[in-house]
Image (cartoon, rainbow, N blue to C red):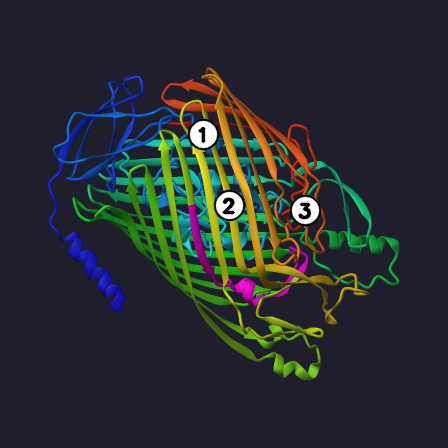
Amino acid sequence: MTKLTLISSAIFSVLCSQSALAATVTGKVIDDKNQPIKNASIHVHGKNQSVKSNYLGQFAIEVDANSQLHISKDNYVDSRIAVSESSSNLSVSLKPTSVETVVVYASALHKNSLEMISPVSVLSGDQLRNKSKPTLGETLKGLPGVNASYFGPVSSSPIIRGLDGPRVKITQNGLDASDASRIGPDHATSSDSLAAEQIEVLRGPSTLLYGSGAIGGVVNVVDNRIPTSNIDDLTGAAEYTHDTVSNANTVAAKLETGNDGFNFHFDGTKRSGDDYQTPNFTITDDDGDVEKEDSVENTFIDSETLNFGTSYVGEHLTIGFSYGSIDTDYGIPGHEHHHEHEHEGETEEEHEEHEDEEAEEAVYAHLEQDRWQGLISYALHNNWIETINLRVGYTDYSHSEIEDGEIGTTFKNKTTEARLNVEHKFADWHGMVGYHYSDSDYDAVGEEAFTPASVTTTNALYLLEEREFGDVTIELGARIDDYKIESHISEAEHDHGHDEAEEEHDEETLDYSKSFTNLSVSAGAIWQYKPGHSIATSISHSERAPLSAELLSNGLHIATGTYELGLGYNIEGNEAHFEPENIKQETSTNLDLSFRRFSGDFGYTVNFFYNDIKNFYFQENTGLVYDEEDGLESAIGAHDDAVAVYQFTSKDAELYGIEFDAHYQITSSAMVKVFGDSTRAKLKDDEGNLPRIPANKLGSELQYDLGDLQLTLTGTHYFDQNDVTAFETQTDGYTLFDAQANYQLGLGSVDAQLYINVDNITDELGFVHSSFIKDKAPLPGRNFRFGIRGYF
C-alpha cells in the first residue's frame, strides 16, 4: 500500500506542475527530388495530436518548447526532428525506400521498424489482410525465423527461433493474451489475427518489458479497440471470405466513429468450417492397421468474436476501456479416448455397432473468453516526464473439452494485469521506467486435468533507456521479477499406488508455495553508418522460473498422447513422488547481430543469433509408459493402451541460426523477395538434439502490379528435418506454392477489393515436424480462397 501511495503522489505532483504554452510550427515535406509529398503524417512525439501535409506538402501543428516531430509516409524512411516554439518554415526531406516502415507499438519508445535495435517483423495494412489466417501461428509462419506448432488449422501457435510455449509471449496491446495455449498445443490462442490492425514479432532485448521469460520473442497483436487518436467521421470495413479446403465461411466487420474527442469502436468476426481436406496420406491406428485418408477428422470450427471500445482523447489526457468476448467450438484432431469393451459372445452386427459408437466419440473444445481492458494516458508539456501511461486488463478464460455432449475437462484461467509506464527524457537520455503486475488464477477440473490448480503472481520493475551518439544509438534495459507460484496438490495427484489400504492417504493434500527472483539485463546498439544502411547488435541475459505446467504436471494428456510429469516429480518404481527440491531457474544469454539496408530499390535484413541456455526446461521421453492398472512401467511388454511418459527436465542447451529477407524492386510495378531461416537447437555435452525443432525454410515471392490488379506468387521449401532426438522420427521436406490476385474496385466512396488466393497450388503433402500429431494431421491440400472486402 505504501508503494502505491508513493507512486500516486509522484504522479499527482507531476500533473500539477506548470507547463509551457503551445506554439504553432509550420513546414513543408519534400522528397529527395524536392517535390512535395502529400498526406505525410506529422506527429508530436509523446502527444496524441497529428496532422497531414496538403497537396503542396505544407503543414502546421501546435507544439511545446523542445518537442520532437515524427514525419512518416508509406515508401519513405521516417524522419524525426527537434523543434521549439520558435521553429517555423521547416523543410523536411524524406528518402524513398521500397520497405514499408511502421511504428512498432511494442517497442515502447515509438520507434519504427527500421530504427529498432532488436530484430522485428511487422505485418500490417494490406500485407496483414492478405496473409491473415484463422490462427496466429498460421498467419505468421511465413516470416523469417517464425514457424507454427500446428495442431491442425484450428490451433496453431507461433514458434520463434525454435522456441515456443512460455518462451514466446503473446500479448494484445501489450497485455498478456491470458489463454491456456501455453499449457498444451491443442489449446487455441485467443488472439484474433482477423481483426488485428498490426501484428508485431519482436526478438532480443526489447522483449524484457513483457517478461523475463520471453527469450524466444514477443508477438504483440495491435488493435484499435481503445482508440488513441480522435475519429472525426464514421468509418468502417466489412469482409467475406470462403475457403474451399474446409468449406469455411468468414464474415468480419468494423465500425468506428467519434465526435468532439469522444470515440467509439466495434468489430466482430464470425467463422464456421468443416473438417479440412488433405492430399492422400496413410495413418496407422492403435491396432496396427494402415488406413488411407484424404482429410483430417474432427477439425471443424465455429467461432464468434465481438469487441466494443470507447475513449476520450484530449490534448493531454486519453482515457478509455474496451470489452471483448470469444465463443468458439473447434474439433481436436488426434484426440482419442481408449475405452475397453467386452465383446465376447457378441454377434458380428453387435460388434460393428459397438465400433460405430466408439468412432462417434469425437472430442471438441468449447472456448469462452471475456476480456476487459482500460487505458489512462497523460502527456505533459515541456517536462522531463513526457507521458504517463497505465493499462489494466482482466481476462476470464474457459476451455472445456466435450465428449458425447458432456464436459470431460475444463481449464480456467482468470488473469488480472496492470502495466504502468513513465516515459521520460533526462539530459541526453530518453527512456521508460515501469511497473508490471500480473495475477493468474489457473484451475483444471476433470479426467484430463494433468496440471493442478495454481495461482501465479508476478511483480516486476523494468527500465529501458536510449541515447544517441551521432550515428550510433545505444539502448540499455533491465527487469527484476518477484515471481511466486502457489498450489494445493492432492496425494492422489502424485502417488500412483492403487492399494485400497492407501485410499485414506490418497485424500491428503500438500500445500506448495515457491518464490523466485528473476533478474534480466540487456544492452544493444545500432549504427547508421550511411543513409539507409545500419548494423545492430544486442546482448541480453535473462532468468525464468518454471510455469505451473512445467513444474506441477502429473496426468494423462490425451491430446498429445502422453502422460506428463513436471520438474517437481521423482520417479521411483511405478510411482511418481512430488519432491520439488533444487529447482533451478532457466538462465539464457542471447547475442544478436543484424545487417540492414533499406534505401533505394534493393534492401535486406540479415539476423544472426546465438542463445546459450542453462537449465533449459523441456519434455523428455522417460522410456516408461503409463497404464491405468499398473501405473508407471517399462515400455517393453506394456499393454497396448499404455501411453508414453514424458517428464519435464532441465539441461544445458544452445540454439543458433540465421534469418533473412531481401527484396529488389525490378521496376515500378515488379518486386522480387527472397527469405529464409535456419535454426540449430541441441543439448550441450553431446547429449543430443532438442525435440520438435522446426525445419529450415527458404522461399521467394514475386509481386507484380498491373494497374488495379495486384498479383503475387510465393514458393516456400521446407527442408528435411533429420536433427531429431530419441523416440522422435525424421520429417521429409516439401515445397508449397501459393498465388494471390487482388483487384481494386471503384465504388464511389467505398474502397473495395476482390481477391482470390490459391494455397498449395500443387496439392503437396506436407508434415509439420514441430507438431505433436504430425503423422495424423498433415497440412491442408489445395485451397481456393476468395472473397471481397470494402472500406468506407
What's the distance in space between the residues labelled 3 and 1, CA to CA? 32 Å
Which sits in the foreground, 169 or 685? 685
At a point 38% along the width and 34% down the height, the residue shown is 102
Q: Which numbered tag is attached to residue 774?
A: 3
Tell me if label 3 and label 1 are in contact, CB under 8 Å. no
x and y percentages locating residue 44 in the rendered image: 23, 37
Magenta range is 538-562
- Say what amino acid the circle numbered 1 marks: Asp
x and y percentages locating residue 199 in the rendered image: 44, 40
N-term-proximal mark, 3 vs 1: 1
Residue corresponding to mark 2:
609
- Say what amino acid the circle numbered 2 marks: Phe
N-term-proximal mark, 3 vs 2: 2
Which sits in the foreground, 750 or 590? 590
| Quarter that holds the N terminus | bottom left
What's the distance in space between the residues labelled 2 and 1, CA to CA? 30 Å
